[in-house]
Image (tube, grey):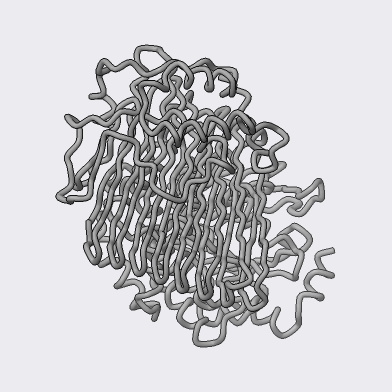
Amino acid sequence: MSTDAFLARYAERKTGLGDLALRERAAGLLRAKGLPGPRDEAWRYTRLLPLTQTDFVEPRAEAFDASALLARLPAIDAPRLVFVDGRFSPVHSTLPNLAGIRAGVPAFGTGARPDLDPLVALNTMLTEDGVAITVPADVDAGTIVLASLATGQGGRAIAFHPRHSVTLAPGAKLTLIEIGLGEGVYFHNPVITAAIAQGASLTHLRLQTESETGFVLSTVYADVATGGTYDSFQLAMGGRLARAEIHATLSGPDAIAHLNAAQLLGGVQHADFTTIVSHDAPNCASRQTVKTVLTGRSRGVFQGKIEVARAAQKTDGYQMNQALLLSPDAEMDSKPQLEIYADDVKCSHGATVGELDPEQLFYLRSRGVPAAEARAILVRAFLDAALEPISHEAGRAAMEDAIAAWWARQA
Amino acid sequence: MLEIKGLTASINDKPILRGIDLVVPKGEIHAVMGPNGAGKSTLGYVLSGREGYEATGGSATFNGADLLDIEPEERAALGLFLAFQYPVELPGVGNANFLRTALNALRRARGEAEMDAPGFLKLARAEMKRLSMPDDMLKRNVNVGFSGGEKKRNEVLQMAILRPKLAILDETDSGLDIDALRIVADGVNALRGPEFSALVITHYQRLLDYIVPDRVHVLAEGRIVRSGGPELALELEANGYAGIVADAA
């Protein structure tokens, strides 16, 4: 669907939507810039042509059966907020025992940049639902599951743009496990803003197992104040065209950001993991381990930008990006980018693209391990450095199960 | 019993094995010695099925089964084990997990029940104690950050746990100090019995002081040029390979 078509959709519907000033501004920004195209440097490796060539309709209000998708949600003993086709579904949700939850309307939060990111402008313009999660000072809110289920609506290609916000007061703690899954063709365009106050800690685990014919373009903005932590891991294996963009801003001293990810791709899938880490204050640390496994004719992208402001002395930045090509027709594009304006910093990055090591394979097989199992062991071993930092047991188990299921489907 | 007849193999079209004839009867340990470049390691790789080391002629059977026609894991299931000259590092794979996966793959292939984690740990700890290996070597990634001696001990540990019927030890003595050599040799000797045979590939006689072979074969330029009892190793140690290789030529 073209920029104009999305704008026309907005023009038809805007009288029914709230927050009109915000939406009008976003529409103006989208009209001026348009959806990202080949001339946008940030979208050089990810073309939205298949998206712009697909017509999306509005989700129907009637409830489509989500029971099969619900059954696929990993068993995690935690309250869950379930969205079906982009709308909050109270019947499928179990609310956490937390006063600061408001679901059912978009949670615009702070920190989003519709002026720089056209997809965020699109989200702002058309969003209809979302959840705001607020954790008071020094409260450990435990784990909350945030699930998006796309039913396929009986063959209708829908577009939905949920808008969520997470606000952690000083010393607050939360683990947010975000799970996306669905059937059929759809366009899921979520935006999440996270404001992490002094000494607060957000663990953000994301399991993206969406429909292999879906379009999933997500944007996260995390602002981390003094001594705070944004610890994120994303496993992406769904979507025909998927991009996860994370902006992490370390705005106070001693803040920490981990942006780890694993992408498992096959067929004709295209997945892009783009991160922008801004070190704006001294003594902050950022860590990124990104692993991509590609089969078939899939294509993976990693773009990792680390910006170190002049004030951000003693920055400790680390970025490692590795890809494993299991097919001669798969392709990986990787673009690390360091912009450093401070003089006393430690920043390192590395990127490798390789295949399974025949010596390692032979070693395992010579010990009696069948070839397929040996390959599975080596693929899992390749991912280990990205998975190893996940300390949340149930979240980690869900990731492991998803990886095992993915591998079983490749065989 | 391992029976090799007229075995030839080339690497990148260059003939390396030029017709090997060798029989290792059940329960015996044979040494294969020879100068560098004689084809010793190639023999080990061809027998264990490494990619790029295919036989071009001849045969190799183990207890009547044609070894050359089957996958490496099938050879392992028959009881073949290659102790690597350069054990491979597997980052991201825990040693305990690796050993148990291998053991259970072999048990499955042989129609035996898999071993559970507690049973396996008990077995592994007992074998490690015998090999003077610290317990934490089970937790570490396979061979990652291991010293040369630790890697070789890890090979012998695998052998002790997997209990092969035929072990091929490819220069297992290289890079070992005398204490480590003794430990490794003890590990091999502990497996000795009527059901265990081994082919000990080595450049030096030293290892054979500790693993005393039933027969010694000299491999030069891709052929067995002489065979004899353990005393042949001592003769080689005293006189070098030059005389024997020249006699054969």
Q: Nearer the viewer, residue B221 or A250?
A: A250
- Residue visible at 55% across and 45% down in the picture: A273
**Could one spot residue A112 in this view of the protein?**
yes
Camera-side residue of B35 and B126: B126
Quadrant where the image shows the N terminus of chain A: top right
Q: Residue A67 vs residue B229: left or right?
A: left
Which is nearer the eye, A210 or A169? Answer: A169
**Above-or-below relation of A77 to A314:** above
Residue at point 55%, 82% (across, down): B209
- Check the image and name the residue furthest to the front: A21
Q: Is residue B209 left or right of residue A407?
A: right
Residue B78 visible in image? no
In this view, the residue farthest toward the left is A97
| Number of disc labels | 0
**Residue B205 pos. (x, y %):** 63, 79
Residue A134: percent from the left, percent from the top? Answer: 27, 52
Is residue A110 rendered to the left or right of residue B172? Answer: left
Q: Quadrant of residue A160?
A: top left
Residue A229: x percent and y percent?
Answer: 40, 64
What residue is at 45 percent from the left and 58 percent from the top? A223
Q: Is residue A150 above or below residue A351?
A: above
The residue at the point 37 percent across, 26 percent down is A17
Residue B42's place in the image compared with A27, above or below, is below
